[in-house]
Image (cartoon, grey):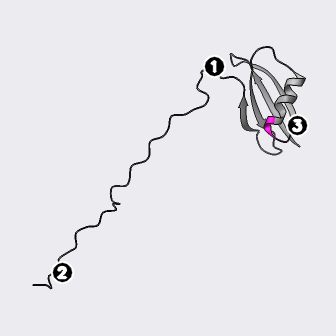
Amino acid sequence: MKLYEVVRHDGAGRHRGTFILPGLEPGDVMPMLDRMAPSVEPMTHDVYRIRRFRRPRHLVTFGPRGDGSAGVREPRRPLPHPPGLRAEAGLPRDSGAAR
């Protein structure tokens, strides 16, 4: 099993606790956390993977979002084509031999 660090924040962004829990996937630690330390107010949970010789890696954030954006980004515009590459065929050159 892997170890995950769960950092709990309240609605104002204040730190409300850190828990180290075992699990196979990041989603496995949330039911365990709810049984161990239930919260009355809505909380945001950041889940980090604890690695042996490197810094913890942020994996996922669980919880409500106050801004209503749901993590949706604006779509990107496609990049313009380079000006020198065209798919049109040019006019054939006159070789001068047909005179």
**What amino acid is at disc 3?**
Pro
Task: Give the residue furthest to the left.
Answer: 99
Q: Which quadrant of the figure has residue 69?
A: top right
Q: Is residue 63 above or below residue 60?
A: above
Q: Position of residue 34 (x, y in %)?
A: 85, 24
Task: Give the residue furthest to the top.
Answer: 40
Q: Mark on residue 95?
A: 2
Measured Cα–Cα span from mark 3 to mark 2: 78 Å
Q: Which quadrant of the figure has residue 72?
A: top right
Residue wearing tag 1: 66
Q: Which element type, helix, strand or loop, lies under badge 1?
A: loop
**What amino acid is at disc 1?**
Gly
The 10 Å Cα crowd at callout 1, few under 14, some 14 to 19, many 20 or more, is: few
Q: Residue 76 in magenta? A: no
| N-terminal label among 1 and 2 | 1
Q: Mark on residue 22?
A: 3
**What amino acid is at disc 2?**
Ser
Q: Nearer the viewer, residue 83 or 86?
A: 86
Quadrant in which the N terminus appears: top right
The 10 Å Cα crowd at callout 2, few under 14, some 14 to 19, many 20 or more, is: few
What residue range appears in magenta? 22-27
Q: Residue at x 54, y 34 (%)?
A: 73
